[in-house]
Amino acid sequence: MTENLIVGLFVVVLAGMLNGSFATPMKRMINWQWENCWLIFAVSGLVLIPWATAFGTVPHLGSVYTGVSTSVLAKIVLFGILWGIGATLFGLGIDRVGLALGFALILGITASFGSLLPMAILHPDQLTTKRGIPLISGTLVMVLGLTLLSLAGRARERGAGTRENGRSGFTMGLIICIFSGIFSSMLNFSFVFGEELRLRALQLGASSAMAANPIWALAVSGGFLANCFYCVRLLNKNRTWGAFRRPNSSLYWLLGITMGLLWFGGTLTYGVGARLLGALGGIIGWPIFMTIDIIVALFWGAVSGEWKGASHRALSYNWAGVAVLLFAIAIISAGGAA
């Protein structure tokens, strides 16, 4: 095993740990509403940090953007906005079903659709090939895993004596997570259609590991529009703007910014790790990243007491669902490696 491979694996594992932890600070922001927490995360993680990173790592960034066609930039922003809808639903989903189930449900769907949708739209002829069949098979296995996880959530909810209203409604949370997973896969479309932008960054002196940063900055800024719109709507509706000015709220601001650092830091770190893995990046890098992401989220969910008092039946469904989900990701990865 070469040194680059060892370092690459370590970096990918670190990326999964960062991404799997990004929503954890919300557990400590008990005096803010969801919209307060999520808006600070969106501003820091989807605007300030990505653009600071792009300016700091890509030479002649302005020329990078002016050197590509308007249609390419428009596609990146459009798919970024669609991804932003998924990101908004992500926050709402984990708020209802918890970190553990939310991450497993959403990332499982994203792993499937992120590979299957681009192939179905851009290369439908490959659906019956050695690449397409594992993707379709993995998606079908994914449905079984998601079914087991939904049963786990329902069993946990019944054991806790909650009813389906407001934040305790698991069925609504499940629906939100499913749509979040589908829309969240659109970020991969921004990357696919933004290849011209990445090549332009390389021409102007960006390193291969950082050349995609102009794509990420533009795409997640498009996603910020969707997140910002919904958060502002809730802030006006619920009259929760005043929470930002409450005494001793500086810690909450710091926690919100930490969410942004963890999320974009994990995304950026994964890109570096996948590059270090070379040709293995798409074969073993992605499933390791997704697996660590889910496992870390399960850990934080358990630490925060999400499954405290859950029945043996609920826990059995949960772990069986996670196992099937990870198996489905492995099948999907095999398709990507073909």
Image (cartoon, grey):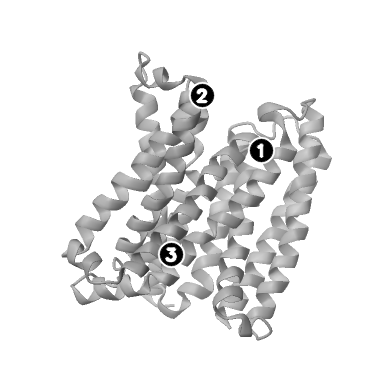
Badge 1 is on which residue?
A: 97
Question: Please, what is the three-letter code of the amino acid marked with disc 3?
Answer: Ser
Task: Please state if 44 lies on the left or on the right of 26 as rendered.
Answer: left
Question: Please, what is the three-letter code of the amino acid marked with disc 2?
Answer: Lys
Residue at left offset 81%, top offset 31%: 158
Q: Choose top left, top right, bottom left or bottom right for residue 279.
A: bottom left
Task: Please state if 335 lies on the left or on the right of 46 as rendered.
Answer: right
Badge 3 is on which residue?
A: 190
On-image quarter of the N terminus: bottom left
Residue at left offset 33%, top offset 46%: 47
**x and y, in percent, of residue 228 in the image:** 42, 39
- Which of discs 3 and 1 lies nearer the camera? The answer is 3
Question: Please, what is the three-letter code of the amino acid marked with disc 1?
Answer: Val
**x and y, in percent, of residue 251 in the image:** 36, 25
Q: CA distance from mark 2 to mark 1?
A: 23 Å
Residue at left offset 50%, top offset 29%: 234
Tell me the SS state at disc 3.
helix
Q: Is residue 185 above or below residue 198?
A: above
Nearer-the-camera pick, 240 or 137? 240
Residue at left offset 58%, top offset 83%: 338
The earlier-in-sequence mark between 2 and 3 is 3
Q: Is residue 29 visible?
A: no
- Which of discs 2 and 1 lies nearer the camera? The answer is 2
The earlier-in-sequence mark between 2 and 1 is 1
Which residue occupies the extreme top position in the image? 247
Badge 2 is on which residue?
A: 237
Q: CA distance from mark 3 to mark 1?
A: 28 Å
Q: Is residue 236 above or below residue 320?
A: above
